[in-house]
Amino acid sequence: MLDKLNNKEEKIRVRNNFCEHELYKVCDAAFLPRAGKLDGAQVNTEDIFCEVAQLLDTLNEYPNFKSEQKDIEKCFSQFMLKYRDWPGTTVRDRKMIADTVFRIVRELMNHRWQLCYSEELYDAMSEVLNEKNELEDSNELDQTLFDNSHELDTWINQDYNGHLCEEIELVAKVEPCKEKKRSGRKAVETNSITASFDYLPRVDNRPQRLQAFHSGMDGRFFKVSLRDFIDIFTNKSTTKKILWLGDIIELKYLINKLVSSNWIKLPKSCGKWQLVCARFNIRIKNHEKADDRLTNDSSYVELELKESQFNKSKKTTKTHEKLDRIIAVLDPKVDYTEALNDYLDYQNSIDDHDELEDTADALEHGLNTDLRV
């Protein structure tokens, strides 16, 4: 791997080829404020980009990192030792470079849903950073990464192929006329996707939890038959769609919550938002048509979703009380009947719709468990 680009020409080639790369742009935004604070190290964004690529590829390839905190601590120390050989670096410079690289990769782990141990890596790296943190601008760097979280989420889950180092080496070492190696997942037409979500296939009371979730969500956040909903969340091949009734930000919150909690698995054949677009449509207000209650015209239209709507949408909130209460029925550590009753009590306190009584009555007399999942 390119521990540090060997000459100016290599750096120029990397900069020219990767300047529009999402990760490169994040590295530049994160490191630029710190670059002017270095004591003597001659380090550029290209060097940080290479170091982030090396650590990211390493964590992606070796799953033993997931269980040993000492592995992450050793990794940080090895980075510090390596930077000692970089010309002009002081102890403070080495800490600043290592801290920057670790914080960028840690943020990527926060969004990496394909690795089952991403959350463990995130926690382990956080412990190391908290222990080693002596830099006064760490909060500002974390805020910069948070501001770019949507871009990082898209890149790490849709475009990253586990071999970013090889791509950088290819660009740095060959002449500019050579064709650049492409990376990432090929574009997929969402209308051709028949894959679906897979909710905890081995969890106890799987069909009952899904039915309870459907009971709480149907008519409030989405509209879909129970049979189609079960298929869409149990890894069945289907062309059916759920009609989302809420805001797109709420849909984004829901999916991110289920993915980050590891309660649903996604297929390898498509990206997260590609799958959402394939299995969801959205209902929006038709501003061209007036609401006519006499003709029962709801003035709503059903539209297909696009990936760009999730990538460019405004930030989601950290919590959503109404959704969090109903999502709890899918938590394998929570009793689903108690969670649904809690949600219904909460909903009843803010909404007097008769349909709540129907759902509560259905729960009281036992959920239908005849569905085969």
Image (tube, helix red, strand yellow):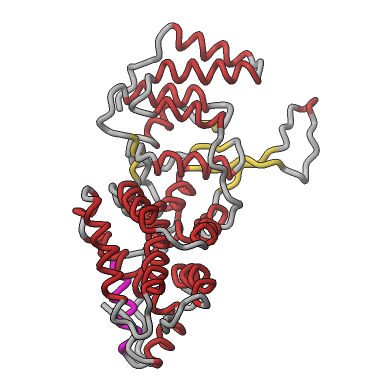
Image position, residue 247 (x, y; %): 61, 41
Whether the magenta-drawn stretch holds residue 236 is answered as no
Image position, residue 300 (x, y; %): 68, 38
175 to the left or right of 323: left
Residue 31 drawn above or below residue 245: below
Q: Look at the magenta stretch and give its main secondary structure.
A: helix
Toward which corner of the image does residue 8 lie, by quadrant? bottom left
Toward which corner of the image does residue 329 lie, by quadrant? top left
Toward which corner of the image does residue 3 lie, by quadrant? bottom left
Residue 202 drawn above or below residue 254: above
86 to the left or right of 320: left
Q: How many marks?
A: 0
Classify the position of the N terminus by image quarter. bottom left
Residue 4 drawn above or below residue 312: below
Name the residue located 41 percent from the left edge and 52 percent from the top edge: 111
- Looking at the rendering, the stretch of residues picked out in magenta corresponds to 162-173
**Nearer the observer, 38 or 348:** 38
Q: Is residue 157 in sight in this rendering?
A: no
**Nearer the observer, 159 or 79:** 79
